[in-house]
Amino acid sequence: MIKRTASAHWEGDLKAGKGSVSTQSTTLNKTQYSFKTRFEDGVGTNPEELLAAAHAGCFTMAVSATFAQQGITTTSLDTTATLSMEGLDIVGIHLSIKGKVPGITAEKFAEVTKGAEKNCIISKALKVAITSDATLL
């Protein structure tokens, strides 16, 4: 069984307080987050941004893996994940991918990305609407 860990530290009240998040890999190491970075605009991260980043990474790897299983090597894949919130509820994530994949059609690229949209590990863990669009470069 694989286990991944992350931790958070917080000081102060909700609006004036501040915190940091760290990951087992130390890629995030006491990375700042606060009310301002979450609900307004400020330097630092927030849980929703981290979820979108995780989803973009997982989805992109799933697309690459599907092509690899078919004997196709991708040249490049770039994904933007846009997480949408209404009030304090995450209501959806849209994945927009652009890719250079030699020897395939735009229809094949869209087909593979739709499969990854539903089957990447993060997609399967979420209970929100997930959509995607694909552009073959």
Image (cartoon, rainbow, N blue to C red):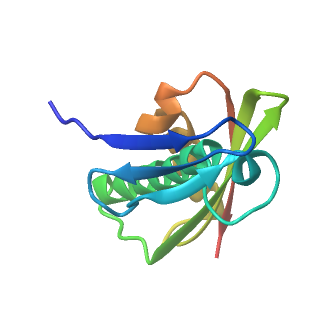
Q: Quadrant of residue 9?
A: top left
Please say whether residue 87 is visible from this viewpoint: yes
Q: Nearer the viewer, residue 57 or 40?
A: 40
- Furthest residue toward top: 127
Q: Quadrant of residue 100?
A: bottom right
Q: Residue at x 55, y 27 (%)?
A: 126
Tell me the quadrant of the picture where the N terminus can be found: top left
Q: Residue at x 31, y 59 (%)?
A: 68
Q: Position of residue 69 (x, y in %)?
A: 29, 52
Q: Position of residue 108 (x, y in %)?
A: 56, 55
Q: Residue at x 48, y 27 (%)?
A: 125
Q: Is residue 27 left or right of residue 54?
A: left
Q: Nearer the viewer, residue 44 or 60?
A: 44
Please say whether residue 101 is visible from this viewpoint: no
Q: Nearer the viewer, residue 127 or 15?
A: 15
Q: Position of residue 37 (x, y in %)?
A: 71, 54
